[in-house]
Image: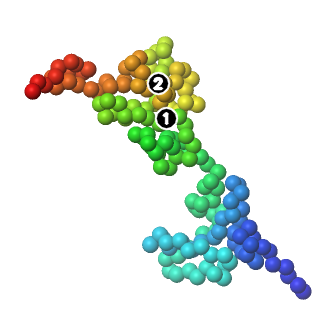
Amino acid sequence: MLTHAQIDCAGVDNGLAMEDDCGDCQSAYVYNFITHSVTFVGTESEAVLGPNDVLVLPNDPGNPYWNQACSSVPGCTDVTACNFNYLATEDDGTCGLVDDCEECQVPYCYNPVTHEVTYVSASDCGSVWIGSESLNSPMNPYWNATCTDCAGVANGLAMEDD
């Protein structure tokens, strides 16, 4: 009787790799839960397990690689922004600017009826969006709000003489 080898998404005969919901080919791996080392394997016979190892199949519920590319992480993707998020994969419009007082000012949602300010993404704002393009506007009460003069007066005019 002839048996036909199944070829997995990685091109391995009788391999353990599977395609996740994102269309990415995910391999099985041996995980050492003491050293946290990961060794990817193509077949079950390649998986040599020690006393501190476990074989993690591609679609195991605890596999962090499975469907990893499917979810986006909203945040600031601009590396020059004061609140850059290196984990963000989707720019949500919340990139901030540094004001003259060296404070990071981030965009916000303003409700003109209640005067409530919420820090959400632009798409989640149901009122007036104060985005990065208007943060430094003279109409923004938060821009330079922490600046004090030499007498400690907010936005004061006192200056030190020579």
**Crowd around label 2: few <14 · some 14–19 · many ≥20 (10 Å):** few
Mark 2 or mark 1, which is nearer the start of the sequence? 1
Q: Quadrant of the C terminus?
A: top left
In the displayed structure, 67 sits above or below 50; it is: above
**Residue farthest along the right direction in this orientation:** 1
Q: Secondary structure at mark 2?
A: helix
Please state which amino acid type lies under the numbered disc 2: Ser
Q: Secondary structure at mark 1?
A: loop
Looking at this rendering, what residue extends furthest in the front direction?
Answer: 162
Q: Quadrant of the N terminus?
A: bottom right
**Residue 94 percent coordinates (x, y):** 49, 35
Viewer-closest of 138 and 74: 138
Residue 73 in the image: x percent, y percent?
Answer: 55, 45
Residue hosting label 2: 134
Q: Is 144 displayed left or right of 40 in the figure?
A: left
Disc assigned to residue 49 = none
Residue 44 lies left or right of residue 151; in this view the side is: right
Q: Is residue 106 visible?
A: yes
Residue sitting at x 41%, y 25%: 136
Q: Which mark is residue 94?
A: 1
Q: Position of residue 30 (x, y in %)?
A: 57, 74
Around disc 1, counting alpha carbons within 10 Å, would you say few (fewer than 14), some (14 to 19), or many (20 or more)?
A: many
Q: Quadrant of residue 25?
A: bottom right
Q: Which residue: 58% across, 82% down?
A: 48
Depth check, mark 1 against mark 2: the one in front is 2
Question: In 3D space, how far apart are the residues under numbered discs 1 and 2 (Cα atoms)?
Answer: 12 Å
Q: Is 106 left or right of 46, judged from the image as shown?
A: left
What is the three-letter code of the residue carrying label 1? Thr
